[in-house]
Image (cartoon, grey):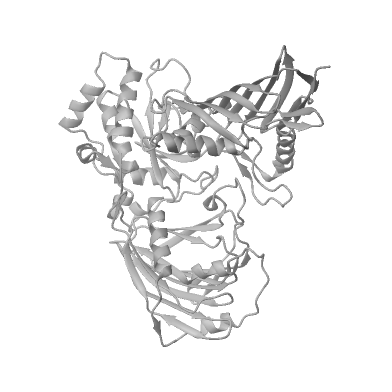
Amino acid sequence: MLKKATSALFLSAFFLLAPALVAADVPDWVRVLAKQPVKTYADDVQGVILLQEQITTVKENGEIVQQGRLAIRVLTPDGRNLAIHPVFYDTESRVNYLHGWSITSKGQEYESKDIVEQSVSSYEVYSDKKMKAIRVPGVDVGSVVAFDWEQQERPYIFQNFWSFQSFLPVEKSSYQLHLAHGWRFRSEWINHEESKPSEENGALIWRLADIPRIENEAHRPSSRALAATMVVTFLSDKSPEKSYTNWSEFGAWYDRLAKGMRDSTPPIKQKVDALAPQNIPMMDRIKALANFAQHDVRYVEVQIGVGGWRPHSAGDTFTNRYGDCKDKATVLSSMLAQIGVKSYYVLVNTERGTFKEKSPPQARFDHMIIAIALPDASYSHPLAAMYEHAKLGHLLIFDPTNEWVPFGQMPSYEQDNYGLLVGDQGGEYIHLPVSSPESNGIRRTAKLKLTPDGTLQGDVEEVYKGFNAMGQRRYLQHATDNDRKKIIEYFLGNSVSAFKIDNFELVNTEDHDKDLIVKYQFTAEHYAKNVGGLLLVRLRVVGELAGGWDPNKPRHYAYDFPAPFLNTDQVEIALPGGFKVDELPEPAKASYPFGQYSSKTEIAGNLLKYSREYRATATEVDLDGINDLKKLFSQINVDEKSMAILKKNN
């Protein structure tokens, strides 16, 4: 993520620079594409990929040469940023050439030699990865921009990807494969039916046309989870250690790569004795070591050579007190071994859905966490992050990189995800646990008072659990009091107008093992509407629970929830003097396989009591359930707008 952000900042700055103009020498293939008839696309489509070619050559020694061609027609003013193309490389690869051209809608031709090279290293990322980028001039609506390049690499893993779907529609895409003698391949398809190649002049060529873009929809799965891709694995008897045909072999490869990295050192042993002495309960010892790796080892992404995959030694990470996710998992595993607790690497992708139940083995992991084998009777109650393994027993999944996640819980993006458990005998593809609704959510209570002029004032307490607490702490913990107040005002402002925060208090912001509590007092003038001597009071005072997307537009993808959750509201409103209830709304009740919602309103003395409960039991609602989800959100919206009607006493 940090590498992507660094690259984006660089490209944004590069886009502002004027490209150097040279005499145009545009190749014929670009001219042919520029003369193609222009097809019609949706108004928000920035551009269309006219041609996308990838040519992969595997040499006898395992070196891989990749050539690419890309041509895009710009369709909107925002599409002018498509005039930039980057190519990434490192110490094990090089860019042999990178060219760029453009042809305007009026036929003017441009060529650019304006290539900029920059490291992707930053304060948070230390890497040998570099980037070459070119920007072509003369680009406006209707222009065709084109690039071609060649890259040579000595890969650590013999695998290649044909990623032919993105945020732009594609008119033509092809993948061409040349294999040296002694090499073979296997191809597997993700999010697309298999297409057979043709054989031409000793090469295998796959061709596809009219590939739709990935639509931008609220709460959809990530682009990587949706994108159609072909995974190509290269196999050779001469280099079996860099290839794999199943998840077990992939895990064995990684186990060999990380061999010896978890070996302990005297300073590590000394620290373990201090943090986790034998006279305290085993679970407390495990937790103390997990806390050290999570909070005392600073996160710095390190990608040097094979360091993109191989962790640094536990001793080095412990001494330096910094490292990336692999390093933090490694030092924790080393420390746990000192108290007799076995642990295992777990490779994951933080974009849930990238890996699915039947995903083929592929090197698209971007994160490492750890599975801790808990001894029997070491814990007294069920833990949300527990994975029960048939042979290895109770495995507690723990992410030492995420500083906001409490011990015993998991970040939402890892729940209901898939990962590779790296064991002594190879790898095992596992389905990671998902927490219960009761483990996440917001419990809100409000004790309020309504005045005759419609002003509402009183106290609100919000208790955040699970992923809700993690998200709030991320924004609140290190913010100033003024910024904290602004965050509360922003949230309250989505539900109430013309209000002011009288005071507020945060509880347990730094104690991650406890629920985060946010308390505040507010005053909202004219909250209740005076209509003909009646007061109309909206019962749902704070918080909107219905998901945000336009139900009138067709839905293309599943709807994602972060994790199961349970949100509740308990609201008490003291009636103003001289008023009584004239009418109450009907209770709400909706139940579907993925979630339930209910609410009710009642009178107790001079108190108007409103309560509701929203329980989500799934992380995803597929397209077959979208109509039911629309119904649920519609019912929630109706309830959230419901009013109690008050009238004056006779």
Please tell me whether residue 85 is drawn above or below residue 417 in the rendered image. Answer: below
Picture residue at 54% right of the left edge, 28% below the top: 440
Q: Position of residue 237 (x, y in %)?
A: 36, 57
Which of 379/162 is in front?
Answer: 379
Q: Position of residue 31 (x, y in %)?
A: 54, 84
Tell me, yes or no, if residue 411 can be seen here.
no
Q: Position of residue 213 (x, y in %)?
A: 60, 61
Q: In the figure, residue 277 lies in which quadrant? A: top left
Residue at the farthest left position: 266
Q: Quadrant of the C terminus?
A: top right
* Left or right, residue 94 beside residue 447: left
* Left or right, residue 74 beside residue 13: right
Picture residue at 52% right of the left edge, 70% below the top: 80
* Left or right, residue 598 beside residue 266: right
Tell me, yes or no, if residue 91 can be seen here.
yes
Residue at the farthest top position: 605
Picture residue at 64% right of the left edge, 35% below the top: 545
Q: Position of residue 411 (x, y in %)?
A: 46, 35
Which of 263/107 is in front?
Answer: 107
